[in-house]
Image (cartoon, rainbow, N blue to C red):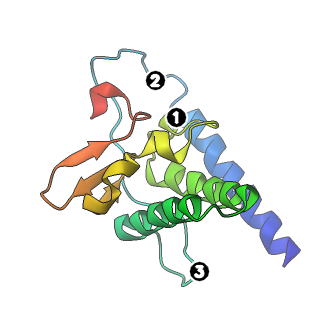
Amino acid sequence: MIAMAMHRRAYMIAIGLAALAACHNAPSDDTTCRCVPGNVSRTKLPDGTYMDSAALLGKLRRHRQDVEQHRTPRDIKVFDDELRFAILSYCQPCGDWVGDRVTVEQMFPLARLDDAASAVCLGLVLHDGKTVYGDARPLACR
């Protein structure tokens, strides 16, 4: 059990380092979006499937529910850290958008969560087809 947890942590660190390396020399031009997220995850869920937009949306709803129910801050942080790694994978090759200190609330417009039909990299696709993005996604890429 401990070995599996250590392997998972090493895998998540490797994903993070790969993301940083992939976008290290990205241009700083704020008027043109030069990165297109894949919206595909390599993060496996407990049932063996990979996270998709519906699963990401479910995890965002769980985050909101945990906060509303005043769960232990440590438990919320652990869940949010795992969620951040999953989002980092989901946003590749644009992983630099997911900063180390960025909160779930900065990544996604959680106020619109009830209107969401699915989720994309740092955004929610609403039932009417419109996509709304969180503050962490660059303006030129919204």
Distance, label 1 to label 3, CA atoms, is: 26 Å
Who's the residue at 55% across and 75% down the image?
A: 45
Instruction: Looking at the image, tell me whether mark 1 or mark 2 is earlier in sequence order.
Output: 2
- The answer to the question of whether label 1 and label 2 lie on touching residues, with beta carbons closer than 8 A, is yes
Q: State whether residue 69 is above or below residue 123.
A: below
Helix, strand, or loop for circle 2?
loop
| Tag 3 residue | 46
Q: Which mark is residue 26?
A: 2
Locate the C terminus by quadrant: top left
Instruction: Looking at the image, tell me whether mark 2 or mark 3 is earlier in sequence order.
Output: 2
- Tell me where residue 51 appears, x and y as whole percent: 46, 68
Helix, strand, or loop for circle 3?
loop
Side (left or right) of 90 relative to 120: right
Instruction: Looking at the image, tell me whether mark 1 or mark 3 is earlier in sequence order.
Output: 3
Amino acid at dot 2? Ala
Give the number of the mark in front: 1 or 2. 1
Who's the residue at 69% across and 54% down the image?
A: 77
Who's the residue at 70% across and 50% down the image?
A: 13
**Extreme residue toward the front, this view:** 69
- Tell me where residue 126 appears, x and y as whole percent: 21, 57
Q: Quadrant of residue 31?
A: top left
Side (left or right) of 115 relative to 80: left
